[in-house]
Amino acid sequence: MGDYKMIPDYQTLMRPVLECASSGEVRISDVVERLANKLGLTADDRAIVLPSGKQTRFANRVNWAKSYLKQGGLVEITGRGRFRITDRGRTALADKAATINNAYLAQFEDFQSFKNKASDADVKTPTTEETLEAESTPDEALRRAHSTIIGALSAELLDRVRNGTPAFFERLIVQLLIAMGYGGTSEEAGRAIGQSGDNGVDGVIDQDPLGVDQIYVQAKRYGEGNNIAAGAIRDFYGALSLKRAHKGIFVTTSAFSTAATETARGLRSRIVLIDGPHLARLMIRYNVGCRDEEIIHLKKLDEDFFEPT
């Protein structure tokens, strides 16, 4: 039987993963195989699986290494299961004395932003993390780990959505709203519009079987930092007025400016704003673009059961 202690941790794997991508686009599955061979892992070592039984421990750590490198801007996703090194990654590799780990990635603003979103705290140095781990109760450590996993998933979901086509984004939004319960159970309740002459509306959700009550959707697939301005909200309001609609949802993969948020509050029509982080949270909550891999139930003693009768 393999020994998981023989498998390097994900931070130790960051430089080897980066080296695998140094010559061009690579598949993560190929990287897993190449590194397993390079490290001399036995068949038993490679066969060790996570408790979920859906992924090997080594593949899981290689994937986490790639994910963190991506959040630090050292690699970029090029397609399903594929990635390549960036200029920042090449600079990191060129520094032979550099230990590429979380502490190294913390120098980059985008990685700090990722860590802050994942844990609602500043990026921790290895020493701080070790101290926090020692002081944490088991359930605190589990919840913190869950927060980190969700943060990484949120970032990856937004990346995938931003790299998709506008038509895909519009369909995604309609699918998400139906999953949230808008439009009932009818398969025809939501439909993407996305055609010329749609007067600034990208989708519509029927709130009843006859389509008497409808919610209109505007979807903007923008990169981080390209925030929605107040003018876009006013344009959407105008589109709603032309359709005599009273409900609208404006979704973006970026964020809304302060003026845009204030404009939405001041309009008579009810316009709900959903920014990138909120969109990712909703996708995770309603399993759109992701799925449950493993469910862990936390149990506690039932004191009432043991009370004398």
Image: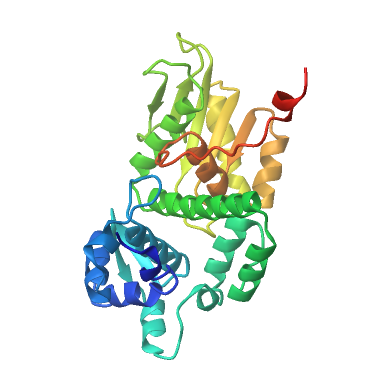
State the count of labels.
0
Quadrant where the C terminus is found in the figure: top right
x then y, percent, for residue 96: 39, 90
Query: Is residue 300 placed above or below 253 in the rendered structure?
Result: above
What colour scheme was applied to this rendering of the protein?
rainbow
- Direction from residue 266 to residue 143 in the image, left or right: left
User: What residue is rendered at 35% in x and 64% in y?
Assistant: 3
x then y, percent, for residue 228: 57, 50
x then y, percent, for residue 113: 58, 63
Quadrant where the N terminus is found in the figure: bottom left
User: What residue is rendered at 69% in x and 28% in y?
Assistant: 268
- Direction from residue 21 to residue 289 in the image, left or right: right
User: What residue is rendered at 45% in x and 65% in y?
Assistant: 68
x then y, percent, for residue 146: 55, 50
Q: Residue pushed farthest top?
A: 210
Report which quarter residue 125 is drawn in: bottom right
Report which quarter residue 168 is drawn in: top left
